[in-house]
């Protein structure tokens, strides 16, 4: 008797957690094993699926229940406290921004679509601006990021929140930060990684994403130049060890320095193990003790103070 396959949406997959059953890809009218039961899909593998615009994998029908139970398993030790009434539209605008970005990542013409994120990004920033004293835990702002789309939404929200707490209050500036955060990794769509590329070659190509992202935004008249600079410079480091231009210190655009911290923080959280709060604590420690040279010292000090209050 032949086995029955059923679909498994990308959103059901927990990154970094052993799979309860095998997952398959459907290629050339055949099901091919992508990962076996017990294997782990890490963030890089998940990101590859996203960038290849694969939205659905397949599993054997007999594993359906195990997968449902597995993907509903919550990694947070406790749900975050609800936000006060005036911030309740936040989760809706967050989902809206997520959807828009997902559309861009699935599109064959992302360049034509980036301007559609403008409104979503503005709404997101407006909601975050209502936050100043409402955030008790970072879990109210940050979710697990499995791939680039989750990560970009997290970075946008965290960047705006950090900027606000650092004293930036002008709505237009916060919108630049929010939009820069949302689009910072959009250049990954233009990176062409071959299945035969070695991991080193793939990593080298991936380093082109800030420049490719900036180029993608160049023809977009509605995207402010500030946003392009954030996109181009979000991997530059204070000590000059970043890329693409090895800019140093004050040569890095002021708002990019905030997004850089939020980006590094969310990446560290995404790579960690354990509950969300455990990962957040570890990420703060890592920034504080090992990576501090890479960031604007004044901004990092403020950011760490703010992040520590939420964990
Ligand atoms: Fe990046
Ligand atoms: Fe990023």
Image (tube, rainbow, N blue to C red):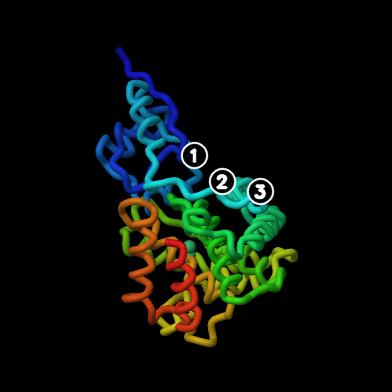
Name the outermost residue toward the right: 221
Q: In this view, does 1 lie above or below 155?
A: above
CB at mark 1 closer than 8 A to ligand 2? no
> Which residue is drawn at the image coordinates 37% and 65% (left, top)?
283
Specify whether residue 104 is in view. Answer: no
Counting residues from the start of the chain, the first of labels 2 and 3 encountered is 3
Mark closer to the observer (2, 3): 3
The numbered disc on residue 106 is 2
Q: Which of marks 3 and 1 is in front?
A: 3
Q: Real-space Cα distance between discs 3 and 1?
A: 27 Å
Residue sitting at 37 percent across and 45 percent down? 75
Q: Residues within 10 Å of mark 2 (few under 14, many from 20)?
A: some
Report which quarter residue 17 is drawn in.
top left
Q: Which residue lies furthest to the left in this view?
A: 38
* Residue wearing tag 1: 55
Q: Which of 52 and 8 is in front in this view?
A: 8
Q: Which of 155 and 201 is in front in this view?
A: 155
Nearer to us in this view, 49 or 253: 253
Of the two numbered discs 2 and 1 on the same chain, state the one appearing first in sequence. 1
Percent x, y of residue 38: 25, 38
Image location (x, y in percent) of residue 225: 68, 73
Element at label 2: helix
- Position of residue 93 measured from the top left corner of the image (x, y, whole percent): 64, 49
Q: In which quarter of the image is residue 8?
A: top left
Say whether marks 2 and 1 touch (CB < 8 Å): yes
């Amino acid at each position: 008797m032949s086995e029955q396959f059923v679909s498994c949406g990308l959103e059901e997959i927990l990154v970094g957690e052993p799979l309860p059953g095998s997952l398959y890809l459907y290629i050339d009218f055949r099901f091919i094993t992508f990962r076996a039961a017990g294997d782990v899909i890490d963030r890089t593998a998940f990101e590859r699926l996203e960038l290849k615009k694969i939205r659905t994998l397949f599993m054997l029908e007999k594993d359906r229940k195990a997968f449902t139970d597995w993907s509903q398993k919550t990694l947070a030790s406790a749900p975050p406290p609800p936000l006060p009434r005036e911030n309740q539209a936040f989760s809706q605008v967050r989902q809206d921004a997520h959807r828009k970005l997902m559309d861009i990542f699935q599109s064959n013409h992302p360049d034509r679509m980036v301007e559609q994120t403008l409104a979503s990004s503005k709404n997101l920033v407006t909601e975050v601006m209502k936050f100043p004293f409402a955030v008790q835990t970072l879990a109210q702002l940050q979710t697990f990021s499995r791939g680039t789309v989750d990560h970009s939404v997290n970075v946008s929200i965290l960047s705006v929140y950090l900027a606000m707490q650092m004293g930036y209050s002008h709505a237009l500036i916060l919108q630049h930060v929010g939009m820069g955060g949302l689009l910072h990794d959009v250049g990954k769509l233009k990176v062409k990684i071959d299945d035969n590329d070695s991991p080193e070659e793939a990593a080298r190509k991936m380093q082109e994403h800030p420049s490719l992202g900036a180029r993608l935004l160049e023809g977009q008249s509605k995207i402010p130049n500030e946003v392009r600079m954030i996109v181009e410079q979000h991997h530059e480091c204070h000590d000059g060890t970043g890329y693409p231009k090895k800019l140093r210190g004050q040569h890095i655009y002021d708002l990019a320095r905030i997004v850089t911290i939020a980006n590094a923080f969310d990446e560290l959280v995404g790579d960690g193990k354990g509950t969300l709060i455990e990962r957040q604590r570890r990420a703060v420690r890592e920034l504080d003790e090992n990576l501090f040279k890479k960031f604007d010292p004044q901004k990092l000090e403020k950011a760490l103070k703010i992040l520590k209050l939420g964990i």
